[in-house]
Amino acid sequence: MTPSEIIRLALEEDIAGGDHTSLSTIPDKATGSARLLIKQQGVLAGMIYAREVFRQVDPALEFDEKMADGTVVKPGDVPFIIRGAARSILQGERLSLNILQRLSGIATSTAQLVKLVAPFGTRLLDTRKTTPLLREMEKYAVRMGGGRNHRMGLYDMIMIKDNHVDFAGGISSAIDRVNNYLREKELDLKIEIEVRNFEELEAVMEHGGVDRIMLDNFSPVDLAAAVNRINGKYETEASGGINARNIEAYAATGVDFISSGAITHQIMSLDMSLKATFSLQG
């Protein structure tokens, strides 16, 4: 489902049989404008989707963009002004704000962690811990915050996790099955495997057949030892319990990637509002 389809359904959910409050209180010819007012410092994300909201509500509305996604904003900034029919502006107000606030919150959270790991050359990744049907939008916000997208779904990368290993009968069996499957299906996908301890790491190192090793819930000390053991033979990724308080210690180990589910599912929306000025003369 594309973002435009999601917005269409979201508008149907919100408006359904009609915005009866606006229809009953605002003359049909009333026009005006509204400006998006930033109330909290952060990174802006979601402008392309807000524009689509107002386009679908009323193509005649004028969306005057002042700032682009990825811009660092501060209180008092006005990223866009929307002009046109008063009823149409009010119909798109809440949905556009919901999207902008959430996506800007994700971009801001991402940017904070990216800044912490940047001196070490470590790259920050998101995960599949996203809101159902909103993954493309939320991963877009991660990119606007300077992060990188991990796989988009189950279809574009092999990720062998603990349950796959257990059901497959062990690490060697799981890796062999994956490589056989990719050859049979003629698929060109990267293979990543999760390890939970040094014993599993040694099993992967001895067997091979992967592109990246995810070191799950390793302490910074153990992670440094594991990265040293891998010694550049495979890409390395750290995950599990990593946050703003300890991410620098993890990045300092020399790990290639750090993945964080928190940047998409444990975030605070950025504070902003849509301030309107309407004219009843039309």
Image (tube, rainbow, N blue to C red):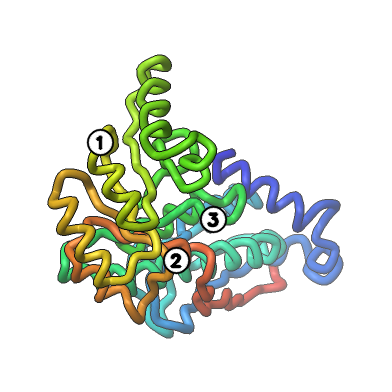
Of the image marks 3 and 2, the number of the one nearer the N terminus: 3
Quarter holding the N terminus is top right
119 displayed left or right of 240: left
Residue 131, horizontal then vertical, whole percent: 59, 56
**Disc 3 marks which amino acid?**
Thr
Kind of element beneath mark 2: helix
- Residue at which label 3 appears: 130
Quarter holding the C terminus is bottom right
- Residue at which label 1 appears: 208
At label 3, counting other C-alpha atoms closer than 10 Å, the crowd grade (few under 14, some 14-19, many 20 or more) is some
User: Could you tell me if the residues under marks 3 and 2 are in contact, i.e. CB atoms within 8 Å?
Assistant: no
Of the image marks 2 and 1, the number of the one nearer the N terminus: 1
**Disc 2 marks which amino acid?**
Ile
Query: Image point 44% across, 54% down: which residue?
Result: 127
Residue 137, horizontal then vertical, whole percent: 50, 52
Q: Is residue 151 visible?
A: yes
Name the foreground residue: 146 vs 234: 234
Name the foreground residue: 120 vs 174: 174
Kind of element beneath mark 3: loop
- Residue at which label 2 appears: 263
Residue 214, horizontal then vertical, whole percent: 34, 52
Kind of element beneath mark 1: loop
Cα separation between marks 2 and 1: 31 Å
Of the image marks 3 and 1, the number of the one nearer the N terminus: 3
Query: Image point 35% across, 25% down: which residue?
Result: 179
**Residue 238 position (above or below residue 179):** below
